[in-house]
Amino acid sequence: FGREYTAASSPTARHPASRADMALVGERVVVSGLLRRPELNSQVGEATSFDEANGRYTVRIGTEQIALRPMNVERAPFRSSGAPAETLEPHAKVRIHGLSARAELNSCGGTILCWHADKGRYGVQVEGSLETVLLRPTNLEEVKPPRVREKWAPEWRSAEADAIIENKERELLAAEAAEAAKHPFGAGFGAAAGGGAAAV
């Protein structure tokens, strides 16, 4: 499960867990002050639970879960507008996940209505219903619309194509003229017709 990483400190740095220490459960947090795993500093994760026995948060960063002291985590920064750093715009499509009190909503789709700065939650209309729920950013995953591939269409009657067609037509006309000149019946009929007209 989670491994423990702490900042360099003396044993006296331990302190009893308080209600304030547990306030970040379910929130997006930023890791800081780690010496054993400095690559995790400034990483954003989710504080999924708090273990009162050892006074540490369980923080999920990607697929990894680590145990961190309260001194090594802080709430992820918010923009001046009050919206989270990863803002979901109104009308954005989302997928709900990670709910325990309303587990039946997990995997349901929804539409972002607005951001409630005072509650730190989005107003989300659940897909297929008129129900509106307030959800933390950590319980929402934006659903990107599928990318539409542009259909390829060949250029119709380009200048090059017109030139090819014109040359083919000339070749056909020349071939028909050459064939007509070789036809004896056509030539004799023309001569006879011409002679008859002169006699009259």
Image (cartoon, rainbow, N blue to C red):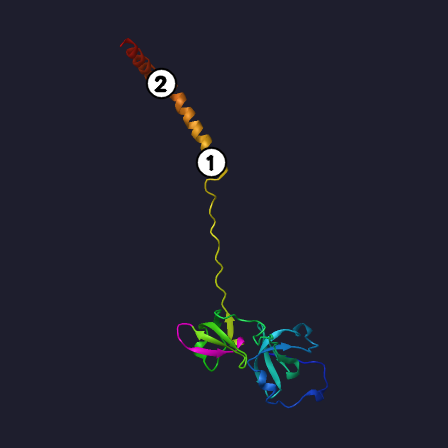
Image disc number at residue 178: none
Mark 1–mark 2 distance (CA, rounded to whole Å): 32 Å
**Between residues 74 and 55, which one lies in front from this camera angle?**
74
Spot the residue most to the top.
199
Can residue 23 be seen in the rendering of this structure? yes
Image disc number at residue 183: 2
User: Magenta segment, which residues?
Assistant: 127-137
Q: Residues within 10 Å of mark 2 (few under 14, many from 20)?
A: few
Residue 183 sits inside the magenta stretch: no
Q: Nearer the viewer, mark 1 or mark 2?
A: 1
**Residue position marked by numbered label 1 in the rendering:** 162
Quadrant that contains the C terminus: top left
**Between residues 60 and 139, which one lies in front from this camera angle?**
139
Spot the residue most to the front.
200
Residue 27, percent from left and from top: 57, 79
Quadrant of residue 25 in the image?
bottom right
* Residue found at x 31% / y 13%: 194
Residue 166, percent from left and from top: 45, 32
Q: Residues within 10 Å of mark 1 (few under 14, many from 20)?
A: few
Look at the picture and state if 24 lies above or below 189. below
Q: Secondary structure at mark 1?
A: helix
Asked if the residue at tag 2 contacts the one at tag 1, i.e. Cβ–Cβ closer than 8 Å, the answer is: no
Residue 100 is left or right of residue 35, and the answer is: left
Quadrant that contains the N terminus: bottom right
Residue 174, percent from left and from top: 43, 24
* Residue found at x 41% / y 26%: 173
Looking at the rendered structure, the kind of residue marked 2 is His
